Structure formats: C-alpha cells, structure tokens
Image (spheres, coloured by chain):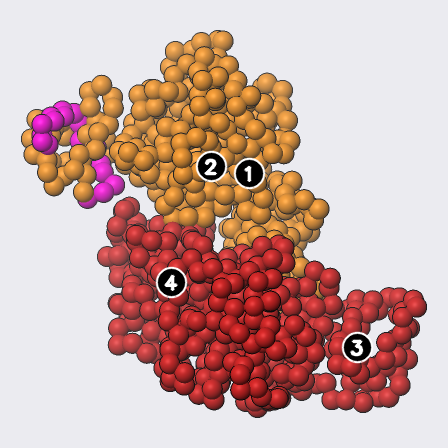
Chain colours: A orange, B red
C-alpha cells in the first residue's frame, strides 16, 4: 500500500475507510476519511485492505499549491483571516512539522479539522512551503513575508502562520524585521500531533485566529501558556524562545512576561460569531496599534546569508574559528555578560579589521550583555565587538542578516531596537 | 599610582589609607586597609596621594600560591573545610572574576572579608588558578580535581570551590565526571562584587560552607535562590545553568527544582558554633550519601580536548562544519527534539563513519531529545548520532571530553547517566 491508496483499515471493533496519507511515524497509519477528517491507527494492530491503488494524489511536493490562495463562502459581516501554511497542516492528524499532506491544505481542510474555527472569520488559505521546520531557510522567510504582504493587500484583517515549532522563533523574528505590518501576524503550531489526546492544535488555532482578529499590529507567536488547556500566551516574535523539547507550554518570552494572554474559553465564546474577542485578551504591555484597513505593509526582505552564529564553550579550539574569516557577520554566544576566552580576542580583532560585523550575545539568554565591567569585555569592545544588549542569540543572527542587507550601518543597528528585540535598560522588554 | 602602592584616598569626609589593589572597574579604586578589609572608592570624586610606591606585591600571576595550602588555628571540635580559589577571591572587594588579588588569597583573607565564616569550621585555603572564568581551560579542571582530591586526603570534611560565574557550570560538570568524592564539593561565586551594596558574596560563602559541612557527597553549585538574601539553592553540578547575565539568582537547575535549598538565617545560626546545619537544608531529592571519613576520592582526570560543541541555526552554511572533520567528538545543539537541516545529515554520516562520536542535544535546554518521532530525527539516528537524553549541551561537551578519555565506548556513555546529568524519563532529574 502507498499513500494515495484507498484503504479499509480494521482495528479491533472499528473499521475506517478512506485515503491513506503519508505518516510521520512508523507506528501509525493515517487515513483521510470521506467526511474529511483524518484518523491515526496503530499499525501493529491493524488489518489493511487496499480498495483502490492511487485513488488520490497526496504527494504534492514542496511547491504544490504554493502561492495559490483558496477561499470559501464569504460573509461580509465577518473579518477576513488568512491562514498561511509553511509545512504540515492544521487540517490533518499529521503534525504541523510533516510536510506530506500540505498540498491538500486549504481553508476547507482547516475547518474540517478544527470545526471550532467556523463562524469566526472568512478564511483565506495559502501554502508557502511544505517542509519540516528544521529545514526552514532564509529564502522561505522571504517568500513568507511576501505572501503575508499579498494577503494583507488582498484585504486580510489578520494573518495566521502555521509553522513547525523547531524554528518558529527564527521565522517570527525574520518576519518581524522584514515586514512592518498594519495588522496582526500570528505564528502558531503544535507540539503534539492532532492524533494524540493531548494535542494542542485546536486551542492554539482558535486562540491564534482570535489574536489575529484583535486590535493590534504585533507579529506574535501564539502557543499554550500552561500545560492546561486554559490559555495561550502571545509572545513578541523577537523575544520568544522554545524552551522545552516537548511540553505544550514550551514557548516563553525570555526575560519577562509574554505580551499578552488569551483566555481560551472566553475567546472561543466571544469570537464564535465573528466578533473580535479583545476582551478575552489581557495585554501586559500596550501592543502596537492596528493600522488603517487596507494600509500597506512595508516590506524589506533582503537578507545577507553570509552570517554565522558561534557559541563559545571552554576548551574551544581557536582554530575552530578559521571558517569565520571573511564572513559578512558573526554573532557570538558568549558567557555571562558577553565574554570569550582571551585567546579568541585577537581573532575577533582581525575579523572586525577585515570588515566583519561581530555582535555579542550571551548564552545566559536572559539579561543583557555588558562588556564594560570586566577586563575581557573591555578588550572585546576594543577589538570592535558590538553589544547586542538583551537580544536573544538566535534573533541576533536573523537581525544581523537583515541589518547587513537593509541598513547602512549594521553594527550600529545591532545596538538599537528595531522590532522589539532589544529592550530598554529600565524595563524587562518593550 | 600603581597597584601595590601605599596610598591615602580622600573622598568627601572620609579618608582611607592602605595598599592600592588592581580594580575590575575603571570607576573605582580598591584599597586594602591595614585591618585587612578592602574598600572601593569612587574614582571620580577621590583625591589620591601615593605614600609609598610598590609597598606590596599584589601582582602574583597565574601560578602564585598554586598548590600551597595555608592553615590557621585548628580546633579539633570543628569540621575542616577546604576553600579552593580558581580566580578572584572572596577575601577581596574585587569580584571573584578578577584574578588580580588572588595571590593574597588564604584562609585569613577569607575570614577578614566574611567574618560570618568564623567559628563554623577549621579552614584550609588553597589557590589553584588566578583567572577570569571565561579563561577556564580543561587543564585547570584537571588541576582543580587533583587539588580537591588532595584536600580530601588531607582530611577536609568538605570542599568549597570559589569560581567565576561565567563558566562555573562547565567546571562543576567537569569535577562531577572526574571525581567520585566521599564529601561535599560545593562551587560558589558572586554575581555582584563585594564593593556593591547588593553583593551576594557573604550569603553565598556562608551557605556554601554550611552545605560543605552537611551530610551528603554531592558536587553542587550554591548560589542565591531568589533575588532576596533569604536562601541559597543547591544545584547538582551537571544540571545547573547560568540563566541570567547579572541577576543574583541567575543559576537554575534546568528542567526541575534544585537538589536542595539552604535557609540562610537558619543555616547561619545553626552552623555558627561549628555544628552541621543540616536542619537548615531542605532536600528536594535524596542526595548522594557522605562517605566514610578519610575515604579515598576516585579520580579520573584525563580529557580528550579534540571535542567541539556546535549550535545549529537556520541558514547555517554546511561549509561551516568543515572544521569538524577528524574531530574525536562533536556535540550538536540542535532544534526541538534534536534536529538539524537535512542538508547537514550527510556530513554527520561522514563524521561518524570517520570515527567521530556525534552526540545530539537540544537548544531548547529543557526536555530530552528524541529522534524517533520525525523523519529528520530518524535520518540522524541512521547517520549514527547518539542521543544525549536531557543532558545540557554544555555539560554534554564536558562529558564527551571525559567519556572519550575514560570509557571504552564514549558513544554508549553519552546515552547513559554517569553523574546525574541524564535523568530518567519518569522523573525530571535524578
């Protein structure tokens, strides 16, 4: 049997009939039922009969559907939300992070998988990529930013980006720098696939749609706030980090509270008839104001790809830095307030002399670098290192790629806040 | 004026006379008074007169005092605690992290700087190194482990290691793998130098000494548990991480509660007459049992230095991995459950085929890697990657250096718990 075959699956007392989908696990079969739902079945205990080979093309590939927007019935009283997929889909029992079924992604698929979304908005569906998020690349960030701009120009009142969790923080940072959006851009995903009882996909999707309908213009990550199904946190895209490999509340705003919290029950109820559920969102800081309807999104998608992030650890061989010679930019993840072994300082001095922008961040993650306190730090400043404040290391890498391509002075830009990534001394974050 | 000069410093109504010490900041002078205390004086508002040039040698250099143990009056009713310095000193107003005054480090200096330590123990003082901790190197880990073993053999009932905070977690990990100690080995340090009102040095020192006197045999990091002066946390050396650049409670046990909490006031009072303050320590898990007095510490200090840690980020150029060819070991800090871009998998396969041990950790930090869930992970396992469970990336690097030199099968060792670094699935940590 192959993906695309029409099959009948018997397991225990239950029989399912439908089209076999590609599966992310060897342990489960995933079957798309005729009603549109997908179901996962334990392969070990299942009897499978192939009813029709190749009944449906389920192998669309990375570009299938790319750029194609799909629409369903339009209700002019509802806001319009664009659902953009970068790999995997909320409309499947297969995790966001598998690309295999993305070719079928459209607004109808989403509504079938998450019926709770119905009535909240007019949905536009769009596929930008079809990848595991560890395979996300700067070129796709650019396509994603362009797709978001397109959707806004086409009238979207908010955009939801469905994304694998592995590199969501990098992509949310990239969009934050590339796009000055007049409407909400909300990344969401799932830590547990929809065929698991503990899946977080429905609550994350509903909260993301409500956050995209709300009155602000932030680029956010919307994921479970706790291990319960009670609330989602809204994290500014440049301050968020996946801090656990598997927990549903893995995403956290580093060094402070999230920008806001969505009460799931209240948001689900208030937003079900298409109204905005702003009252269900508690903001910890004033969010950026929503722009005029139809306002243009400023877009600057150029990126300098010749940038590396290097993490310093004790015992590191200075020769391990040879490959940095000639780079356009280097982000160092130093220790403490922003330090490396003294032996590496002459190498940094040479890099800077050669034109490389070298920015310092801290592997502590929380707190800001400050190289004025200790001798090593002062030597680093003398060598030409730029302090990235409290910018997260991963965000700093994305920022440096963007700043080298879009600002006249990337070194200066690394010391300034561009998109909420570098917070003021007097408050934990913007 | 130069460090070592005898000076008189007038500032406002206050006059201080003593020997000028090297200072870690450009803003302050540090003067060692004749009574033994050090004082920091704002340079901008001070008038300084040099009374005698070069009155004292304060520039001991890295090896000064190395290996020399000093003792003061011995009370046979008190336990014996060895205070080992690796750079900077608790006996100075200058932060632990400056090496400049370490040459003067002895037990008397410590008691002068932290009078609250008096009466708690017989103290032995020892200097192993005199460096900023970002300059810590594997060779010094070995000297430190040997010094600790020496001190235990000489009768120490517990050892306190004073260490800069930047790389304390790496050194505590190294000692955890190198040394199977029958007595407590307690790392402590200071996030704020003693000349600042918010300094954490006194409480950390008192709690560390009491933790070293207590009934267990853990290798711990003892630092502020909160931003208040009420308690220190005891973190297992292999599970701890500096998670903030400047906060006094920067150190945290990743993925769980600390091993124990020391109530400062209770410990200070109970231990002041030399008694053990065990009642002031609340253990969250049963600590390793203290060995027999005088029991040998098993020591295995060999390290394979040809090991690198590499952090994967989106957009990473596969050519950036060229320098890994031929390495004895590589620790990858992957995304999520332990992933890298698919393009890097053939490079990993080639490394493993060439004999490199490649271990996977996660940049999420909390949670465990699991490469059986997604296609990329399974490809990584097929390529020969070893999963390091929930071992922290920095700890995994130290462990791989040790395992390559001390076990017959380092790849196998990376998947097993050796020193509390890799916790069981069913509990957050050992």
Chain containing the residue with disc 3: B
Q: Which mark is residue A258?
A: 1
Tag 2, which secondary structure? loop
In-image side of A7 versus B279 (left or right) = left
Front of the two marks 3 and 1: 3
Residue B56: x %, y % from top left: 77, 89
Q: Which mark is residue A225?
A: 2
User: Mark 3 vs mark 1: same chain?
Assistant: no
The reply to whether dot 2 and dot 1 touch (C-beta < 8 Å) is yes
Question: Separation of disc 2 and disc 3 at Cα?
Answer: 51 Å
Residue, disc 4: B286
Q: State the residue at coordinates (62%, 88%).
A: B72
Above/below status of B153 relative to A49:
below
Quadrant containing the N terminus of chain A in the rendered view: top left
Quadrant containing the C terminus of chain A in the rendered view: top right
In-image side of A142 versus B396 (left or right) = right
Span highlighted in magenta in the image: A10-26
């Amino acid at each position: 049997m192959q993906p695309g075959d029409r099959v009948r699956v018997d397991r225990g007392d239950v029989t399912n009939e439908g089209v076999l989908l590609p599966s992310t696990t060897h342990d489960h079969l995933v079957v798309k039922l005729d009603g549109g739902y997908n179901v996962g079945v334990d392969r070990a205990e299942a009897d499978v009969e192939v009813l029709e080979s190749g009944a449906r093309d389920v192998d669309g590939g990375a570009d299938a559907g790319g750029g194609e927007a799909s629409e369903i019935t339009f209700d002019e009283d509802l806001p319009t939300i664009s659902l953009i997929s970068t790999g995997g889909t909320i409309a499947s029992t297969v995790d966001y992070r598998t690309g295999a079924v993305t070719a079928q992604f459209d607004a109808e698929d989403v509504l079938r998988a998450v019926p709770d979304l119905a009535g909240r908005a007019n949905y536009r569906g769009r596929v930008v990529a079809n990848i595991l998020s560890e395979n996300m690349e700067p070129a796709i960030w650019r396509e994603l930013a362009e797709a978001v701009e397109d959707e806004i120009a086409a009238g979207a009142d908010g955009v939801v980006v469905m994304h694998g969790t592995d590199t969501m923080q990098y992509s949310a940072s990239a969009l934050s720098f590339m796009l000055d959006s007049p409407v909400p851009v909300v990344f969401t995903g799932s830590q547990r696939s929809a065929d698991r009882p503990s899946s977080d996909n429905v609550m994350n999707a509903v909260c993301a749609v409500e956050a995209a309908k709300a009155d602000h213009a932030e680029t956010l990550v919307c994921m479970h706030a706790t291990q319960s199904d009670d609330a989602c946190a809204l994290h500014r895209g440049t301050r968020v980090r996946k801090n656990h490999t598997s927990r549903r509340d893995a995403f956290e705003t580093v060094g402070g509270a999230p920008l806001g919290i969505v009460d799931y029950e209240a948001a689900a109820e208030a937003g079900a008839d298409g109204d905005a559920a702003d009252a269900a969102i508690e903001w910890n800081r004033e969010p950026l104001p929503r722009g005029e309807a139809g306002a243009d999104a400023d877009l600057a998608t150029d990126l300098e790809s010749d940038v590396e992030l290097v993490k310093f650890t004790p015992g590191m061989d200075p020769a391990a830095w040879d490959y940095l010679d000639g780079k356009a930019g280097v982000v160092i993840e130093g220790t403490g307030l922003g330090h490396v072994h003294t032996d590496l300082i002459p190498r940094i001095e040479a890099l800077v002399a050669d034109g490389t922008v070298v920015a310092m961040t801290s592997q502590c993650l929380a707190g800001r670098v400050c190289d004025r306190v200790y001798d090593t730090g002062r030597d680093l400043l003398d060598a030409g290192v730029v302090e990235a404040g409290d910018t997260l290391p991963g965000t700093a890498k994305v920022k440096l790629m963007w700043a080298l391509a879009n600002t006249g002075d990337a070194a200066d830009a690394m010391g300034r806040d561009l998109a909420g990534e570098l917070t003021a001394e007097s408050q934990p974050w913007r």
